[in-house]
Image (spheres, helix red, strand yellow):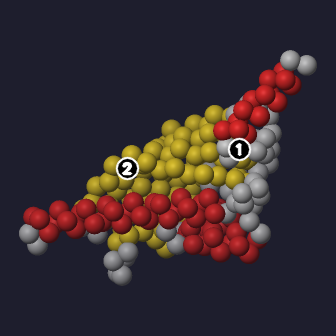
Amino acid sequence: MSNLEQRVAALEAAEAIRQLKARYASLADQKYTTNYQRQPPLRMEKIALAQAACFTEDAIWEGGAEFGASLVGRDALAQWFMRSPWCYALHYYGSPEISVEGDVASARWRLWQIALREQTKKAVLLGALTYEEYARDQQGQWLCSRMRFEQTQMLPIDAGAFPLVTSFEQITDAAVRASSSTHL
C-alpha cells in the first residue's frame, strides 16, 4: 500500500469512528422523551441494545462510580444503558483526537452533556474527557473496544426542579419566575 493509500485509509477510518460516536450519542439521547421521561420499557431496551452494538462483544467500560463503574461486555453495557441515572440527556462529543494504526485506533473526546436526573428531576451540566479504543471487525466496521471517563464534573443548575426550555422566550419567562420567587 502506498503512502497516499495509507493516509486515505487512516482518514476514512477516523471518519468512520466519528460517525460511530455520533450514532452512540444519538442513541444515548433517544432513550428519553421530549417531556423528560424514559422511553417505555420495550423501546428503551431496543435503543439500549442498539447503543451497546456500538461496542465490541468484549468491550470494557470504565465509567466511574456514578456512571456504570467498570463493566465488561456488550450485555453488561446494554443493562447499564437501560438503567442510567437520567430521564433526559443531550450528549455532545467534540474535539476528537483520533489515532489510527491499521485495524485499531484510539481517541480522546471532550463530552459536554445536558441532563436531568431521574431521581430528582434536577438539571445538570456534565463535562468529561473520554479515552477510547476501537477495533475494526471482520466486516470492516469500527466498534469501540474500551471507553474510560476522566475528569467528570457536573454543575447542578440551581433553579430547582424545572424542565429544560426550548426557546429564548421560555428562558426569559423562567428567569422572571425565578426572580419573583426569590423576592417573596
- Residue at 38%, 63% (x, y): give it: 17
Q: Residue 28 lies in what quarter of the image?
A: bottom right
For residue 81, which quarter of the picture? bottom right
Q: Looking at the image, which residue sits at the far front?
A: 169
Amino acid at circle 1: Val
Residue type beneath disc 2: Pro
Looking at the rendered image, the quarter that the N terminus falls into is bottom left
Q: Position of residue 115 (x, y in %)?
A: 66, 47
Whole-percent x and y of residue 73?
A: 54, 69
**Residue situated in front as seen by the camera: 69 or 88:** 88
Which disc number belongs to residue 77?
none
Q: Secondary structure at mark 2?
A: strand
- Image check: 38 left or right of 95? right
Residue at 55% over, 61% down:
26
Q: Quadrant of the C terminus?
A: top right
Disc 2 from disc 1: Cα separation: 29 Å
Tell me if 172 is positioned left or right of 57 in this view: right
Name the side, left or right, on which 163 lies relative to 49.
Answer: right
- Name the residue rendered at 16%, 66% in the picture: 6
Q: Residue furthest top?
A: 183
Q: Which mark is residue 165?
A: 1
Closer to us: mark 2 or mark 1? 1
Mark 1 is surrounded, within 10 Å at the Cα level, by few (under 14), some (14 to 19) or many (20 or more) other residues, namely: few
Q: Specify whether residue 66 is in view.
A: no
At horizontal 57% and vertical 37% (from top left) the residue drawn is 153
Q: Residue furthest right?
A: 184
Q: Earlier in the sequence, mark 2 or mark 1?
A: 2
Which residue is tagged 2? 96
